[in-house]
């Protein structure tokens, strides 16, 4: 068999074209994968941002709740003191009225 340079060139050209096609397909596949990865990254960043905002709202709500709880505790503490204050005032008033009554009674005797 004779070695035909034309056939050899065509085979070489065909092999080169096949390799080019395979390389092009590999590049396209890599680009598609990169695009999917980029989209997934953007989605992850968006979700992270959303979760961060929700966490900040939660923290703010917790701070507000804690401030309201502290204020309520203070009010309850002040409310608990009132009966004792009124009782003390009543006792002082009764004591003063008792003194005044005894002085009035002494003056009428």
Image: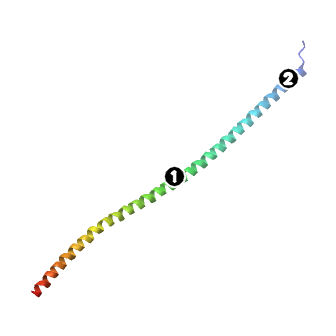
In x, y percent, where is residue 46? 61, 49
Q: In the current view of this chain or complex, which residue is farthest to the front?
A: 109
Number of on-image labels: 2
Please give the residue where the numbered disc 2 appears in the rendered image. Answer: 11
Q: Secondary structure at mark 1?
A: helix
Quarter holding residue 75: bottom left
Which quarter of the rendered picture does the C terminus lie within? bottom left
Q: Give the left or right position of residue 45, taking residue 5 as reference.
A: left
Quarter holding residue 98: bottom left
Q: Give the left or right position of residue 97, taking residue 75 as reference.
A: left
Residue at mark 2 to residue at mark 1: CA–CA distance: 65 Å
- Vertical order, 3 against 69 (above or below): above
- Vertical order, 14 against 27 (above or below): above
In x, y percent, where is residue 66? 42, 58
Please give the residue where the numbered disc 1 appears in the rendered image. Answer: 55
In x, y percent, where is residue 96? 18, 78
Q: Give the left or right position of residue 49, taking residue 109 as reference.
A: right
Which quarter of the rendered picture does the N terminus lie within? top right
Foreground label between 2 and 1: 1
Residue closer to the observer: 84 or 42: 84
């Amino acid at each position: 068999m004779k070695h035909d340079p034309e056939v050899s060139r065509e085979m070489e050209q065909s092999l080169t074209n096949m390799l080019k096609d395979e390389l092009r397909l590999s590049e396209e596949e890599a680009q598609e994968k990169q695009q999917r990865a980029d989209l997934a990254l953007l989605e992850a960043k968006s979700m992270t941002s959303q979760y961060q905002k929700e966490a900040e709202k939660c923290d703010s709500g917790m701070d507000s709740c804690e401030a309201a709880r502290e204020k309520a505790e203070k009010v309850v503490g002040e409310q608990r003191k009132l009966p004792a204050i009124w009782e003390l005032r009543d006792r002082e008033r009764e004591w003063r009225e008792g003194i005044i009554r005894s002085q009035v009674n002494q003056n009428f005797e």
